[in-house]
Image (spheres, coloured by chain):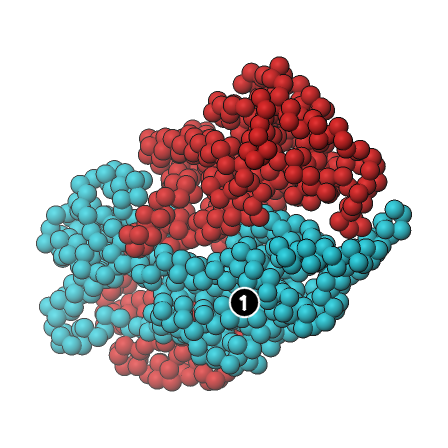
Chain colours: A red, B cyan
Amino acid sequence: MPQSKSDSSKFMFANKQHNKASLLTVFLRSARYEGKFLLHNSWDYLMLLWLPLLTIFGTWWIFSKPYIVDLPIGVIDESRSGYSRTLTRYLDASPDLKVHKLYLNTDESNDALLNQEIYGVVLIPHDFADEINQAKPSPVILKVNAQYGSHSGIVQRGVQSVVGTLSAGVEIKRTVKQGSYPEQAKISYSPIGIERINLFNMGASYQQFLASTVIPALLHILAMIIGATTIGRELRDRTFASWYQNMAYTDMPYPDFKTLKQIPPEQKLAHVQSALSNHWQPSNRFAFLENQHYGYVPYAHSALTIQPNSYQAFNAQLTPDLNTPILPEKVSAATLIAGLNGKLIWATLIYTLWGALSVMLATSAHATDWLPILLVFIAFIALTMISFWLGAIFSLSSYSLRMGLSSTAFISAPSFAFAGVTYPLVAMSEGAQRWANALPLTHYLKVHISQLQMLAPSSIALPTLKGLMVAVIATLLITVLLSLRAFKNPHKWGAR
Amino acid sequence: MSEQTNHDAKQESMKNKPTISHRTFLQGFLGTLASVFKDKGVLLMLIIAPIIYGFFYPWPYRSEVVTEVPVGIVDNDRSELSQTIARYSNASPNLSVRHYTTQEDAMDAIYRDDIAGYLMIPKNLERDVYTSKPTYVSILGNNSYFLLNKQVQLGFTQAVGTVSAGVEVKRSVAQGAYLPTAKVSTQAVPLRIDPLFNPSEGYGAYVVPAVAILILQQTLMMGTALLIGTWHENKRQHASVFGWLGRILALSSVTFLVACFYYGWVFSFQNYPRGHNMLGTLLFMAVFAPVVSTLGCLFGMWFKERERSMQILIFSSLPMFFVSGYPWPISQLPEPLHYVRWLFPSTSGMNASVLLNQIGAPLSYVSDYLLHLTVLGLITFALLMWVQRRQLKREISSLWHS
């Protein structure tokens, strides 16, 4: 099928007698293609193995002392009485707090606050004991560094409960003095008692609250990056069609990724295509090829690329023909589905392992049935697949690996802030809630928290799980459609 | 394009030497500045992304404090007293009450995230209270969500406490006490909490000013590495010491201006505490930005490819945030992380910026942070020079062998 020179992007194979592969073979060949690539590209391999491993154990380690204890506070004791010393002792005994130092005045304590030696200071006024003895309310003041929000929350909780205890003691003592029995005094101090129960995460373990939810959030970011690079890389190198043909034709040799790694992205296509034997070249390219001498080194870009008697130097000349992607005659959606899944199979397999590891860590805190574990595990795999396809979608829709990664960063990096774990969804504006609900992480974390922490009935998680599965299929189909669109616009490939 | 051909010609003329593209400080500065605006990728990363984030990141926290949290009440008493408790609870700004007939229903609602907790009022509450029998109500909060549970506990405790105090006053008066005396004696030692520096205790006001520094760091680091990586691909990465300094100054100046947008506009638009030590803040940024940009240069020389920095570095912001000591107390970190955390400029950056800008500390309080940044910057620059030297050596020796 002769092509006109002006229609330069429409190169196709001259010889159509090549062996077309079945879908299973397409899947396997695509997997093999990617496997060979990963063997020689350590940065990409890093994204599969070492970074997720570092992420999982690193995050778990950061929160390995899961209960916040002994936050340093200061005390300014102007009263210097038995009561104030008792209060100071109680404060120091509180599991939340540690009295770092007694300060003489607010100047000293402010200095310590700004030096981050303490996060709050309790001021006991000079008339503290007198007021108590006269049965007047005798207030205590807590000045807390509220800019450090989480520190401040714990300090407030600790001081509140200590002062509450002291206050109750004073009142009961007072009632007893008035002639009541101690038991009766307790009741009349507080006619309606309050029992406070923290459901599900009784001791407020941050490992359960943050570490177990941050890990999937980080793996989600990494998975989106993998999706964006695995597909975006072929677009950047303009080897998208080479990848397709490689999996579609069983007799096409795999590219030499070892050599390819040393070649700048814009020369990769030429190298891949020139490495193919003549019968793979389009008919209108033969004449051109026969006039070339492969051994000749006409020009070198720099010292680094000079490798005599190799193709690279030849390719550096970037002959327009070799540098134009040979397009498949027909692109089928089924082949793409099998091929895309094959290309990401290594990432899927290894992230399944990471999913298992992170769910195991999350359940190490408290025992759970196998069914909720299984549900969360399935949800995690769905989240990972959605992340892969979303990353691919961002690269494919912009035809650029860089834009794909930029969009990935924009969407995934703040997605934990929107997920409603640290700051609740109900407190967000309607728009922010809508955005949060559009993010897959929000839904995954709902399943994660309801099943692994709240131990809720599995039926609660099923609709979300179904939704995640539908999203996997929807994002895959969008990826396929965008891939088809990409084959129609090969002139847009190679954008940086 | 013409720049490229120009460059090609130049390169051909010095075919046998590795190119040093920026020889003087001015060349480095101007050449880099021009590239920032010519390269869409760098422009997006360095300027547009942080500006968009300035709007986007504070978005979920616009309400600042969590109010009207949906909660349940299971009222097994159905008395006047229990209804008073329900009324007081609903009147609390923290809570918005729904009624459930059984605990199972309420629990189910918690599982569905319809409510964040509930109050269980036992049978015979009113009778027990008025016959002075010990009795209590239970507040059950979903502690899978710390902030929600805090509001649930606080809202119900205050509501029940108020009703309880009312009962106590009534009882004292009945026993012959004078009403005002009865009222004041309900709490012997009240606690007054004085939240310093973030008086409204807003969540956004707490998180965003620190995260803003992280955003500036990540965009500058990745943007710089993207540019240097691109130059590496085109064999234009090498520069003299002054050339590098010019490059670093150019890149960090851009981020310095974006930081001014945060300090001057984003924080005031969001109404966060801000600008308490503006001069100190600017001085801090003048140290912080070059350090980050130097680190970006080092990454660019190491990654050698345009897109690589994003691929590797995007995920790093959350871990850096957690080891900084800002959201998670340093005393809680395992010992080795006490050292590891100083590898990141953000550790000093977030704390110093918040201390200066939000808290208004004088410069002397952040001098250790500034010192850390300076040392980190110097070490990074030395590493950068070493990496360049090694790469140049390799290029020259490969030339020799060919």
Q: Is residue A335 visible?
A: yes
Which image quarter holds the N terminus of chain B?
Answer: bottom right
Location of residue A12 (image quadrant): top right
The residue identified by callout 1 is B255
Residue shown at 59%/65% (left/top)?
A: B34
Asked whether residue A82 is in view, the answer is no
* Residue farthest toward the right in the current orientation of the protein: B401
Q: Please give the name of the residue rendered at 25% of the width and 37% of the height, measured from the top-left corner.
A: B104
Residue depicted at 13% across the width and 53% down the height: B83
> B402 and B273: which one is in front?
B402
In the image, is B121 to the left or to the right of A375? left
Residue B101, percent from left and from top: 17, 41
- The chain ID associated with circle 1 is B
Q: How many numbered tags mark residues here? A: 1
Q: Neighbour class for label 1 at 10 Å: few (<14), some, many (≥20)?
A: many
Given residues A324 and A332, the one toward you in this image is A324
Q: Residue at x 35, y 44 (%)?
A: A437
Label 1 SS:
helix
Q: Is residue A162 above or below residue A424?
A: below
Closest to the observer: B269 or A242? A242
